[in-house]
Image (tube, rainbow, N blue to C red):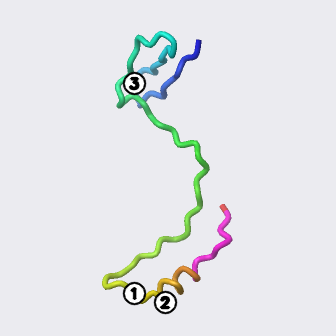
Amino acid sequence: RSKLHLKPKTGEKSTAIDMHNNKTTPKLSNITAIDTRPQAVLPPAIIVDNPPLPYDTYEALLAAIPQDITP
């Protein structure tokens, strides 16, 4: 029998759901989603002023960002 264990928030009890005989229905606020994807290393943000810059300026800004970013 498979059970789904939900990670509780601080101070709350853990909840186990029996998948074949579901008598416990957890509140949605008790479920904490865990993102297991690897964290991407993002390039520095480009802050765009108003009014917009000419297209060539964006090209120059993007070209200035290193492409071989490693963690």
User: Where is residue 71 drawn, in percent x and y?
Assistant: 66, 61
Magenta stretch, main secondary structure class = loop
Q: Which amino acid type is marked by label 1?
A: Leu
Select label 2 or label 3 by which is in front.
2
66 or 13: nearer the viewer: 66
> Which residue in the structure is indicated by mark 2?
56
Which mark, by number, is residue 53? 1
Mark 2 and mark 1: Cα distance apart in space: 8 Å
**Circle number at residue 18:** none
Q: Is residue 69 left or right of residue 6?
A: right
Determine the residue positioned at 58% across, 82% down.
Answer: 63
- Image quadrant assignment for residue 53: bottom left
Q: Where 57 sits versus 34, above or below?
A: below
Residue 51: x and y in percent read 31, 85
Instruction: Give, as a three-letter code, the residue at label 2.
Output: Asp
Q: Which mark is residue 12?
A: 3
Check disc 2: other Cα within 10 Å, few if <14, some if 14-19, many if 20+. few
Tell me how many marks there are. Answer: 3
Residue numbers of the magenta segment: 64-70
Please tell me whether residue 6 is drawn above or below residue 52 in the rendered image.
above
- The earlier-in-sequence mark between 1 and 3 is 3
Q: Are marks 2 and 3 in contact (CB under 8 Å)?
A: no
Quote the CA–CA distance across marks 1 and 3: 51 Å
As helix, strand or loop, the secondary structure at mark 3 comes to loop
Give whichever of discs 2 and 3 has the lower sequence position. Answer: 3
Q: Quadrant of the N terminus?
A: top right
- The secondary element bearing badge 2 is classed as helix
At horizontal 42% and vertical 30% (from top left) the residue drawn is: 31
Q: Is residue 66 magenta?
A: yes
